[in-house]
Amino acid sequence: MWTVARLEPLAAVDHQKGLPMRRALLVLLTVLLSVPVLTGTTAQAAPSAAAPTVAAVPANAGRGWPVSGAQGVLDLASRGYVEEEYLLSGQADTFDQVGLWTEDGRWATRVATTGNPYTTRLVVVRPRDAARFTGTVVVEWLNVSFGVDIPVDFSQSYEHFIREGYAYVGVTTQKAGADKLKSLDPARYGAVNLSSDALSYDVFAQAAQAIRATPQLLGGRTPSVVLGTGHSQSALRLTTYANAIQPVRRNHDGFMIHGRAALAAPIGDGVVGPLSARIRTDLGVPVFVLQSETDVIASASVRQDTALVRTWEVAGTAHADQYGLNLYNAANARDKSINGGAPTTCDKPVNSMTFRYAENAAFRYLDRWARGGAAPPTAAPIAMLLNLIILRDGDQNALGGVRLPDLDVPVASYSPNNSGGNVPGACLLLGTTTPLTPARIRQLYPDHATYVAKFTAAADRALRAGYLLQPDRDEAVARAQAAPVP
């Protein structure tokens, strides 16, 4: 069980580089993704049985803003949104694996311990006017690959959430994130305590319970759809959650698993869980697996498209990119959470492919799917040789996959890998953008009108295929019209 105390509202591998680079990427993904459960039906959820506790948090505590939040980074007020922060307290269960966990994801667990006290935090971004809220809540398992909460999926899709009238809740789910909160702002987060990552699964389940049962979190409204999302190491934990915990707790209506590798997280405090894991096909709720080009190297062995599992691989994209980095760098400068607040910089220009467009479309489809609507459109996988080498065109851009107009009408080559930078490991995942030569651009687009016409046609193809939403199509075409090409 849980209680809520409110904090007052605050206004790929490049085949030319060969297998050594692939091995390096796989090792790094395994390290970053592997941060230190019974067949289900549609019956009522089985909540944790612990008694609630309440923690009062002074208004405007500490520095006066949520770490990793949007305040001072995004102008939410002009968009009709507010950001609020809450403490979530309760007692969580931990779980043990039962039997052999095989690749099919049909995993069983038993409760290992009960009554483990915890206090964590929720960052809520919601419409100021409750009438704008459409009933959909996206709940993110905040990523702690770099030792601090990072709202990766919010950073990619906040514009879509706001356009749609969604509410968003970021959950500090793991010990590393909780400990970092306390070190960065002890006056604000002194009560926060997650004793181990073994609690993370029930903490995430109880966060969804709280969202459903506590209207104050959503400005007096209750949700109709609660979607769980997580990226990278959080995606591995969400894979384990979906396969082992959702059948028991049944607190989510669908999942977005973004940027996963083939493996899954351990159910306890181990470093590595099952080395190969598909999403179970009897889950009863839809699961969208959304992959960048970087991710397919480590996940091609568990590709799947079923009645309730849809996979998109977005060509030309990296595990993280410039768009998300812009928001993270601004938050980091405010919070000074990594590298003293200095921006993350790389030796080469970071990947700038428009992954966010595909993620926005994926969230639109997942929302519809979770409400009983049609499944998302399928997409061809990124073309690979023996699931080892990504096949590329003459401009060194990937073949196959979800095709966005910036890739089909390129002015650069987009790689999932980068070289060095000032944050160890980050740039390898941030990818690169390498502009095509002026001669090549003029060969492709003799004049600006030709470029705009080709780009518009590609955008319309992606719109018809379902990989691009109308507002993003219009934004993309406007960018092309304003671009100095050739």
Image (spheres, rainbow, N blue to C red):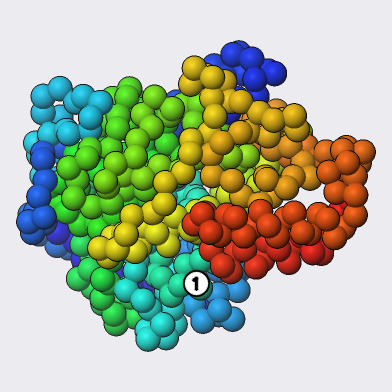
Can the viewer see residue 94 in this picture?
Answer: yes
In-image side of 14 versus 146 (left or right): right
Q: Position of residue 390 (x, y in %)?
A: 58, 25
**Quick one: quadrant of the N terminus?**
bottom left
Question: From the viewer's perspective, is residue 145 above or below residue 135?
Answer: above
Can the viewer see residue 84 in this picture?
Answer: no
Examine the image and state in which quarter residue 225 appears: bottom left
Residue depicted at x 66% and y 28%: 392
Residue depicted at x 47% and y 67%: 161
In-image side of 441 versus 394 (left or right): right
Q: Position of residue 451 (x, y in %)?
A: 81, 54
Q: Position of residue 218 (x, y in %)?
A: 33, 75
Question: From the viewer's perspective, is residue 92 above or below residue 318?
Answer: below
Question: From the viewer's perspective, is residue 195 above or below residue 421?
Answer: below
Question: From the viewer's perspective, is residue 439 above or below residue 208?
Answer: above
* Amino acid type for the residue under numbered disc 1: Ile
Work out whether residue 317 or residue 177 is closer to the camera in this orientation and state it. Answer: 317
